[in-house]
Amino acid sequence: MRRASTLASSVLSRTLATAHGGVGVGVATSIAVHHNQRLLQVALYGSSSSSRGSYTRWWSKSPARVLSLGVAGALISVAAAQEVHAKEPPPPELVPKDVVLYQYEACPFCNKVKAFLDYYDIPYKVVEVNPISKKEIKWSDYKKVPILMVDGEQLIDSSAIIDKLGGKIHSDKRADSKSDNDEEKKWRGWVDNHLVHILSPNIYRNTSEALESFDYITSNDERAALYEAAETWVDGLNGRDFLGGSKPNLADLAVYGVLRPIRYLRSGKDMVEHTRIGDWYTRMENAVGESSRIKA
């Protein structure tokens, strides 16, 4: 898988690059130990702390052996992590040949669609729409975004777009129970009817935050609402890695998609610092992987 192979190469490069002298070897080993521990911690909902002290004398006595273990351990961890969070791309015959998303970059509904496309490794092009003139979508009777063109067919409304594509992808293998589908539907409605409406004030709550995101106003009440929403979502997970269980479902992708534009803005950093959503978000980042966006 593209994401896993890229990650493996990255881990290997960093391990070899740091393995120069005793200190470098120690760093290389700590990377492997850290990766193995993180794999167990994901499974057990543990903390991200690591313990290295008991290995110190072994590092200095056997650097070559430790380096070998560091490289092997890191790569084994990557392979195991891939198994834990393995994606299931649709069969090639079900993947659309030409997908174009008309969007606003920070639009939460557009980002829902992108999270879905990225997770299922569906290549897509992006056309950024001018929010004033909307000249890029003058050809359409529908004057909102997202608009997704799929092999010449126009799809509108983020949830309807995902339903349509999801129906095609899962047409022959989705076997969720009715209760699972009901839960997924409930949380997807919560995203559209509640979560997205508290995001904009948190994206541009004051002048500095507006500049941070280019255009995106108001008071501490908006931050509190964001924190409450994040905690509500974590409570809904009820101890699961994802709402979908061992892998994300459409509700996971919806929440992740609308939060992605703010994650590394001040509001998103505050959200992760002050709520329990950070571990789930990290799992989602790993599960969704790299963007499937291609140049137009």
Image (cartoon, rainbow, N blue to C red):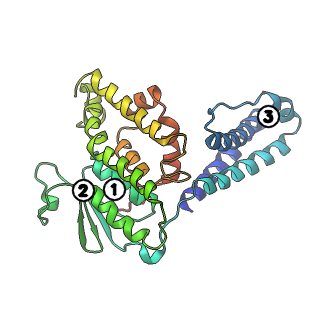
- Quadrant containing the C terminus in the rendered view: bottom left
Q: Is residue 17 left or right of residue 219?
A: right
* Residue at which label 3 appears: 22
Question: In front here: 65 or 290?
Answer: 290
Q: Secondary structure at mark 1?
A: helix
In the rendered image, residue 162, in percent from the top left (x then y), is placed at: 34, 60
CA gap, disc 1 and disc 3: 48 Å
Q: Position of residue 192 (x, y in %)?
A: 28, 47
Mark closer to the chain start, 3 or 2: 3
At x 49%, y 70%, the residue is 173
State the residue position of label 2. Answer: 146
Q: Secondary structure at mark 3?
A: helix
Residue at (14% x, 61% y) in the render: 142
Residue type for callout 1 = Val
Q: Position of residue 127 (x, y in %)?
A: 26, 59
Foreground of the two, 161 or 122? 161
Q: Earlier in the sequence, mark 1 or mark 2?
A: 1
Q: Label 3: how many residues lie within 10 Å, few (<14), some (14-19) or many (20+)? A: some
Residue placed under numbered mark 1 in the picture: 113
Q: Who's the residue at 44% across and 78% down the image? A: 93
Q: Alpha-carbon distance for marks 1 and 2?
A: 8 Å
